[in-house]
Image (cartoon, rainbow, N blue to C red):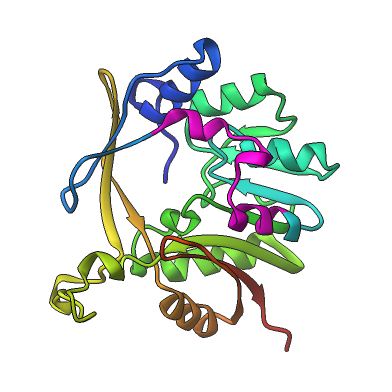
Amino acid sequence: MALISAEKDPMGQAIADYYRTGEAKRLRVISSMFDEDEIPVSTLFRGAEQMNAMERTALDAVYGRILDVGAGSGCHSLVLQERGHSVTAIDVSPLSVETMRKRGVEDARLADFYEMECDTRYDTLLMLMNGSGIIGTLQGMERFFDRLDRILAPGGQVLMDSSDLRYVYEDEEGEMDWNPEWGYYGEVDYRMQYGRVKGEPFDWLYVDLETLKRYAEENGYCLTLLALGEHYDYLAQLKRKVI
């Protein structure tokens, strides 16, 4: 996802409002594929005690220098900072980055994961809250793994979660009501709106575990399943294969 302007930053505006006043309007999530939904903005400010088991597993598994990708309000970075870790938090939302800094994230940067300078290599890439989304589509997998080659330190890892949307399209017999000619069922288009602030449409990828494992192996990585969530979601670790 490319950097966005403050005028088209609905999530950032919602995060900024909630931080400033403790309240926020509806953060609407609009898709051509599903009914309209919304993100409860208060959940973006959860502390360690409000995080689910899968998030806690990820935060316990980090090591070395950490890059928190799509950090939002900085909730994960703040927990890791409190534990003494070195964390860089990045987001494409300028208002989110501004709020992270106000909340005490020591190294919060406005940056696009795919375009940021790679002077530093990281030991852990933390990609939570459906972190696979920034891959966009399956066609983006090669670009994603190429980026990992450039940004991960030797022995580094990616901790990434996703959901398998298969359950959305299963009938009562457990068969998929999805035509492969339509494309991959985990490729979703989204747009967000907060009050009068409208964001640009963007692609978001929910990838099932087996598909992610296949792409990982094709690109020289191994996948380890670390946790299964309660809502068809999972946490995976990706590491470069040792030759």
Residue 29 seen in this snapshot: yes
| Vertical comparison of 57 with 169: above or below | above
Magenta residue check for 231: no
**Direction bottom: furthest residue:** 243
| Vertical comparison of 24 with 77: above or below | above
Q: Is residue 74 left or right of residue 170?
A: right
Residue 122 seen in this snapshot: no
* Residue 208, quarter of picture: bottom left
Q: Residue at x 39, y 68 (%)?
A: 207
* Residue 77, quarter of picture: top right
Q: Residue at x 66, y 32 (%)?
A: 108
Q: Residue at x 49, y 64 (%)?
A: 144
Q: Is residue 54 left or right of residue 94?
A: right
Position of residue 233 measured from the top left corner of the image (x, y, whole percent): 46, 63
| Vertical comparison of 79 with 137: above or below | above
* Residue 41, quarter of picture: top left
**Direction right: furthest residue:** 84
Q: Main secondary structure of the magenta part?
A: helix
Q: Which residues are magenta?
A: 40-59
Position of residue 22 measured from the top left corner of the image (x, y, whole percent): 51, 15
Number of marks in the image? 0
Nearer to me, 85 or 51: 51
Q: Is residue 39 left or right of residue 216?
A: left
Q: Is residue 79 left or right of residue 73?
A: right
Q: Residue at x 56, y 30 (%)?
A: 45
**Direction front: furthest residue:** 172
Magenta residue check for 47: yes
Q: Quadrant of the C terminus?
A: bottom right
Nearer to me, 228 or 136: 228
Position of residue 113 measured from the top left corner of the image (x, y, whole percent): 54, 49
Position of residue 106 measured from the top left corner of the image (x, y, whole percent): 75, 30
